[in-house]
Image: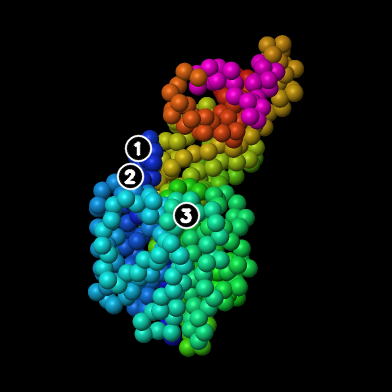
């Protein structure tokens, strides 16, 4: 029997930009999460007494700020060396030879695959051949699988590849290839990296994205970790068990407020959702994005009194226990319950305001003239950042926020709904 771990996309010391803008953010915990998750990986390998560890690229996030990142990584691999566990790894797009300028020699239990051509290595003491090739440059647009050899006979063949495959939505194209390209090699297991969402593409043969070791933002929700793979004496994969590694669990908590009229009920629903997230995280810090949805009379209040609502939600987070849950952001996608046509008939001024709000809707691809004028006076590097941030969805959200506040003011009088 052979047992190995397949991991990828550790992104050690990922910068997690923008945390300073979040008041009360557990910055030290979040910034140290990628290191702690990698430590969990190494400890798992030691506890399970695996035969070898495979890492499918993107150990780092970019060039090291200093040598502390490399020394941390080296120290962890030395722990495996002391236990007689070899490590086989490839460079991905974030730690390609053209990206990482600083170098440190690694312990002698580590093999880094060539970036020039596919390379095959036999695992000492086991009937295993590992095939792999790293990224020489950040961008690898060609199908490098074509360079991989066919399976060695009478061996368990394992391929390591950093790839977006073909047709993976939401990801840039890196070393694109098809499932059929992988199948034709005749390997028993393909250890893939680059896509952060864990996924078993196929079990015949096994084609697996282990996902990243630690989620880094609200787009990377749910458990993050690695695969513990068992190969039987017939050189067939018996199982590829999922193992959690993350220390911070990102979650999007969607709170449906449809028909909710009382603030106390809304907060009660939030508290229940938080409690479940904390329970599911099993002791990990939950980094939560709260998303309100549904048609509710609270729509205007949510937009108009954002600071008070945030304070209330922070209070409910405190009730879950110290350092149990942190609220990263609150998104409001509720809708009003008042009748706009009825409001427009109330008086001439109200009708004019509603018509003006409707005209203020931003057409896709068009920025308001006043925003264009402001952008023109900004330095090019700043302007490009602002333009990229002012996405269509964000423009629409900003306009709807303004509409909600104004409509709430029109639809209420003295705190009572008209």
Left of 198 or right of it: where is 365? right
Residue at image coords 59%, 24%: 367
Disc 1 designates what residue? 20
**Which badge, 1 or 2, is on the more N-terminal residue?**
1
- Of circles 3 and 2, the one toward us is 2
The quadrant of the picture occupied by the N terminus is bottom left
Residue 30: x %, y % from top left: 35, 49
Q: Are marks 1 and 2 in contact (CB under 8 Å)?
A: yes
Residue at image coords 46%, 72%: 131
Q: Determine whether the residue tagged by mark 3 lies in a helix, strand or loop.
A: helix
**Which badge, 3 or 2, is on the more N-terminal residue?**
2
CA neighbours of label 3 inside 10 A, class few (<14), some (14 to 19), many (20+): many
Disc 3 designates what residue? 277
Residue 366: x %, y % from top left: 63, 25
Disc 2 designates what residue? 27
- Of circles 1 and 3, the one toward us is 1
Q: Are marks 3 and 2 in contact (CB under 8 Å)?
A: no
In the image shown, does 192 or 105 lie closer to the viewer? Answer: 105
- Image height of 19 relative to 74, above or below: above
**How many angstroms separate mark 3 from mark 2 (CA)?**
20 Å
The quadrant of the picture occupied by the C terminus is top right
Q: Is residue 326 among what the camera can see?
A: yes
Residue found at the far bottom of this picture: 233
In the image shown, does 247 or 168 lie closer to the viewer? Answer: 168
Residue 259: x %, y % from top left: 64, 40
CA neighbours of label 2 inside 10 A, class few (<14), some (14 to 19), many (20+): some
The part of the chain drawn in magenta is: 353-375
Residue at image coords 42%, 36%: 311
Query: Which secondary structure is most common in the magenta stretch?
Result: helix
User: Does the stretch in magenta take in 355?
Assistant: yes
**Which badge, 1 or 3, is on the more N-terminal residue?**
1
**How many angstroms separate mark 1 from mark 3 (CA)?**
24 Å
């Amino acid at each position: 029997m052979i047992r190995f771990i397949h991991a990828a996309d550790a992104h050690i010391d990922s910068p997690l930009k923008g945390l300073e803008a979040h008041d009360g953010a557990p910055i030290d915990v979040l910034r140290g999460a990628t290191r702690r998750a990698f430590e969990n990986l190494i400890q798992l390998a030691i506890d399970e007494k695996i035969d070898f560890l495979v890492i499918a690229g993107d150990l780092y996030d970019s060039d090291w700020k200093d040598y502390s990142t490399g020394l941390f990584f080296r120290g962890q691999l030395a722990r495996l060396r002391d236990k007689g566990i070899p490590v086989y790894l490839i460079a991905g797009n974030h730690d390609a030879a053209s990206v990482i300028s600083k170098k440190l020699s690694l312990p002698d239990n580590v093999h880094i695959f060539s970036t020039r051509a596919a390379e095959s290595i036999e695992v000492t003491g086991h009937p295993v051949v590992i095939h792999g090739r790293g990224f020489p440059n950040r961008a690898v647009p060609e199908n490098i699988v074509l360079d991989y050899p066919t399976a060695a006979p009478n061996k368990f063949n394992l391929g390591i590849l950093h790839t977006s495959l073909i047709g993976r939505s939401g990801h840039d194209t890196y070393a694109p290839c098809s499932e059929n390209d992988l199948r034709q090699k005749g390997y028993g297991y393909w250890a893939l990296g680059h896509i952060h969402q864990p996924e078993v593409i196929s079990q015949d043969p096994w084609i697996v994205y282990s996902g990243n070791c630690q989620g880094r933002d609200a787009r990377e929700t749910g458990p993050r970790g690695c695969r513990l793979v068992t190969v039987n004496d017939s050189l067939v994969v018996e199982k590829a068990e999922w193992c959690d590694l993350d220390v911070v669990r990102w979650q999007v908590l969607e709170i449906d407020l449809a028909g909710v009229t009382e603030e106390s009920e809304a907060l009660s629903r939030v508290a229940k959702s938080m409690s479940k997230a904390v329970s599911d995280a099993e002791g990990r810090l939950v980094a939560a994005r709260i998303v309100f949805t549904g048609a509710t009379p609270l729509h205007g209040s949510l937009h108009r009194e954002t600071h008070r609502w945030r304070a209330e939600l922070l209070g409910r987070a405190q009730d879950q226990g110290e350092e149990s849950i942190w609220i990263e952001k609150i998104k409001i996608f509720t809708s009003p319950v008042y009748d706009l046509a009825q409001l427009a008939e109330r008086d001439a001024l109200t009708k004019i305001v509603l018509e003006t709000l409707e005209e203020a809707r931003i057409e896709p691809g068009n920025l308001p003239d006043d925003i264009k004028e402001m952008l023109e006076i900004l330095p090019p590097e700043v302007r490009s950042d602002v333009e990229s941030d002012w996405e269509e969805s964000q423009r629409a959200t900003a306009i709807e926020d303004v509409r909600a506040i104004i409509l709430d003011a029109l639809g209420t009088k003295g705190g009572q709904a008209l």
